[in-house]
Image: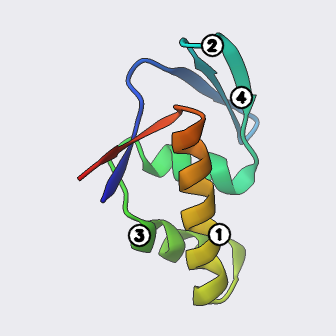
Amino acid sequence: MRYRRNPQTAGRIIDGQAFVVTPDDNKLHTLNDAATLLWTQAAQGTSVDAAAALLCQEFEVDGATAAADAAACLDDLVARRILLVEP
């Protein structure tokens, strides 16, 4: 599976933090450092494995923790309609 940004959302990064507006509910979502990093990577499309590798590199965590955190974060962003899942 690949995760991509929802093209119907609008977002900006200000001082290293992403702010994303979802049009369905007109909510402003403030993303933490890890979610901002994954949201940025999702512009080109990403997988859980690629996201986990990026988290390992940026935050110096072990692979198992990064994989679990990446999967949870990506799932949360999909649930909030910030990202979409492609088969």
Circle 4 is placed at which residue position? 29
Q: Quadrant of residue 61?
A: bottom right
Q: Earlier in the sequence, mark 3 or mark 4?
A: 4
Q: Residue at x 60, y 34 (%)?
A: 80
Q: Are marks 4 and 2 in contact (CB under 8 Å)?
A: no
Query: Marks 1 and 3, Cα distance to the nearest angstrom?
Result: 12 Å
Q: Looking at the picture, how far across and down is residue 58, in whole percent?
A: 64, 70
> Looking at numbered disc 1 in the image, what kind of residue is underneath it?
Asp
Q: Residue furthest left?
A: 87
Nearest to the observer: residue 69 or residue 79: 79
Q: Is residue 3 left or right of residue 82?
A: left
> Looking at numbered disc 4 in the image, what kind of residue is underneath it?
His
From the image, state whether disc 2 or disc 3 is nearer to you: 2
Circle 3 is placed at which residue position? 50
Q: Residue at x 57, y 66 (%)?
A: 70
From the image, state whether disc 4 or disc 2 is nearer to you: 2
Nearest to the observer: residue 17 or residue 28: 28
From the image, state whether disc 1 or disc 3 is nearer to you: 1
Query: Marks 2 and 3, Cα distance to the nearest angstrom?
Result: 30 Å
Disc ID at residue 25: 2
